[in-house]
Image (spheres, rainbow, N blue to C red):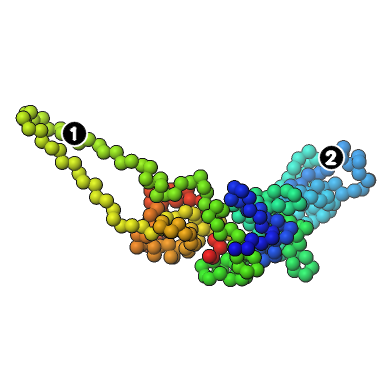
Amino acid sequence: MNTPNYISHTGNGNCIINLETVPDRAFLKCSMERDICKMRIISRKEKSNMEAGSNDIMIVSLSGDRKIISRKELVSNYKFFNGAPIKMAWLKENKTYTIIENKRKDCRVLIIPNNCIGIYNGAKIYGGSYVVANMDSEGNVNKSSLKSMDSKSFRKMYRVPMQDALRNLGNKPSSNRFTLYDNKGNNPFRNNSTVINTNIKPTLERRKEVKPVEKPIVNTMVSKPTQKTQQVARPQVQQNNNKYAFTAVAILTDVNGRSVGYLLEDINTHQRKECILRDVIILLENHKIDNLMVVNKEVNGTLKKIIRGNGISREALPKVIYTGN
């Protein structure tokens, strides 16, 4: 498998992504619905180093952008976070306010996978971060405008519309999908060292470490001693001869963090494959996965199938982005 030139591997199993050369198809379409900012009036001490009549409203966006605007622009284009209009008479010089600007702008976003680190202008951007970019005049990603945000801030300001990358999550891979693949379809993240947390032991090994404890059977009936000692019949533990085929090693999610399936490992060959939820449920109904189970639960009068952990906590499984392979 050829690794793209914008990705390199580290010794601890992580990937380094060069965000300045990553292709545009690695980005999802998104739109800014509103800009959330912190605002303050520039102090008199700061004004002493500025020209007379200069703008004196400092704006800092959650995306990291900074700018100084006029009071007229502030009143005309911005509102308080609760929707109330801004009036200069209410503002104090030594106080910071949260304001919003309702504007729509088409952008692009790339989510750094949890097992990767993005590099941009020498700075590190860690897994789980959202990298937002503006578009140039030709509709391409403007790499010089990249901004890193956490998921909470991103969801407050941006919206990700339905698109091929999300619509095809349950179907066969497509060249239009959200991906960090190279142009031959090779996925550099499909190796064992970058998918599962190596600090978590496989389920079967954990079960082998647990030794069964036999509790002695206490005879509560008082009887006369006899010359012959009677053998106490202990209950026979029946071994489960049903051999499982797979064990779940990770939860597959889409780019918005919603669960879409599981990464399964073949117990015999140790090969891994991605399975969407409907295929996982079929395997569970045939008792093919050792650490998951499916139960029927009535939700709002409708009977639904719910996947739960079997001998483990389902939430303890690591989460990785679904790639369609």
| Foreground pick, 191 / 25 | 191
* Residue 263 x/y as whole percent: 48, 58
Callout 1: SS: loop
Q: Amino acid at mark 2?
A: Ser
Mark 2: secondary structure: loop
Residue 140 x/y as whole percent = 74, 67
Q: Residue at the location (68% across, 50% down)?
A: 125
* Viewer-closest of 303 and 231: 231
Q: Residue furthest top?
A: 225
Q: Which residue is mark 1?
A: 218
State whether residue 143 appears in this view.
yes
Query: Residue 245, how many percent across, how many down?
Result: 38, 59
Q: Quarter holding the N terminus? A: bottom right
Q: How many marks?
A: 2
> Which numbered disc covers residue 43?
2
Q: Residue at x 36, y 57 (%)?
A: 244
Amino acid, disc 1: Val
Q: Is residue 308 left or right of residue 18?
A: left
- Residue drawn where x is 73% and y is 53% of the image: 120
